[in-house]
Image (spheres, rainbow, N blue to C red):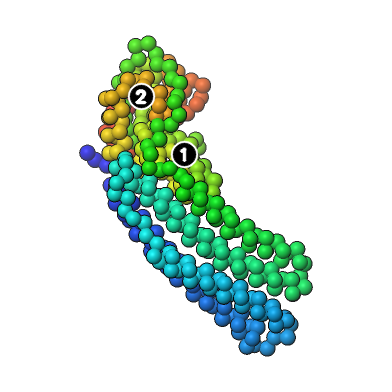
Amino acid sequence: MSFKFKHLFEADKLSDHSRQLAKTTFRYGGIRALITSILILGLVVYFFFIAPNDYFPWYVGVILIILAVARLLVSTISFRKMAAFDIPDPHVVEGGGAGKLAVSVQRIGEGRARYKLYRALEVSILLIGLGILIYFLGLPWVLGAFMILVALFMPVLQVIELKRIAWVDVRRPDEGEEERVEIGDGEILLESLPGIMRYGWKSGGHEIMGKGKSIAPENALLITNKAIWVLTVPLPGSGQVVAGTNISVWQWQTAYQDIRQGLEYLVSSRTLEELLHRNRGKRLMRCEEIKHVEAKPHRMTLLLVREDGEKFGYVFRQIEDFEKAKRALRIS
């Protein structure tokens, strides 16, 4: 079986590679932050206690040195914690490589959020010091107060993001809410095609502080003698956006075999109505509602236009499934 995206990793390899890359990024990021904090402490000591300085009272220098030492302490803790941060290989995960990928995405997201929390604490300490300097420089005190307020608010936001990422359940395959579907009399399944992904402005997802949903998580196309349907083969993490990563998109790219096997199991073990009742089943259009169908072989995309003008564009993961869709829809 040929793959269009041979250069992409499979789900297991991508998970391993991502974990190693994350650990390296956290480690070197901690080193940079530690060096920066040492330089800031040295500059404060030099400016307030070594170089001639008659402008600021001595206690301002003491306050700033305390803040610089606090930042150095945060950087040291960050360096030690993030250097030792490890993302264990999730060997036993339901859903095969797709499940392993989803768990890795969440754990890497947690590590990134923790890394950003340490950086936010460092920036907050710096902003507090700047706020104090602004006051003693005679600038409007409101500016300094605003900087201190921002400094206190930043770590709180990062803690909330870290908690939201940790609360996402990516281990359990999500079949979605029960949908009320109406199957036509005598409607039978002609083709079940795994590995599709919607493209266009109604694709993608939305996220708020580390947690969100995919707008169009469907990954399979069903063609019957009376309609065209889509559904989401339930995989761990499908439909979730975690720490900026749309898991459904990466599962489409790397976990085709898991999607295909899941769809084969659903089709063989359930009736058409049961199949669509869960799994986010959605009818795109009845056969008589089809206004236009366009296939682009070089992109493996299928564009379906309903009689009311609504457009549905899907890209296929495998050329074999794309060709089956063309034959079922009688596209030359």
Is residue 134 visible in this depiction of the protein?
yes
* Location of mark 1 (residue): 214
Camera-nearest residue between 252 and 49: 49
Among the 4 quarters of the image, the one containing residue 239:
top left
- Res 275 label: 2
Among the 4 quarters of the image, the one containing residue 171:
top left
- Image quadrant where one finds the C terminus: top left
- Which residue appears at 48% of the width and 68% of the height? 77
* Residue 141 position in % (x across, y down): 76, 66
- Which residue appears at 40% of the width and 66% of the height? 83
Please give the count of numbered marks on the rendered protein.
Answer: 2
Is residue 300 visible in this depiction of the protein?
no
Q: CA distance from mark 1 to mark 2?
A: 21 Å
Query: In this view, which residue lies farthest toward the top?
Result: 185
- Res 312 label: none
* Residue 97 position in % (x across, y down): 30, 44
Q: Label 2: few (<14), some or many (≥20) within 10 Å?
A: some
Please determine whether, in this image, residue 169 is positioned above or below residue 107.
above
Look at the numbered disc 2 and give the secondary structure of its residue.
helix
Give yes or no for contact between labels 1 and 2 (Cβ–Cβ under 8 Å): no
Camera-nearest residue between 121 and 190: 121
Q: Is residue 319 left or right of residue 75?
A: left
Q: Amino acid at mark 2?
A: Leu
- Which residue appears at 46% of the width and 39% of the height? 214
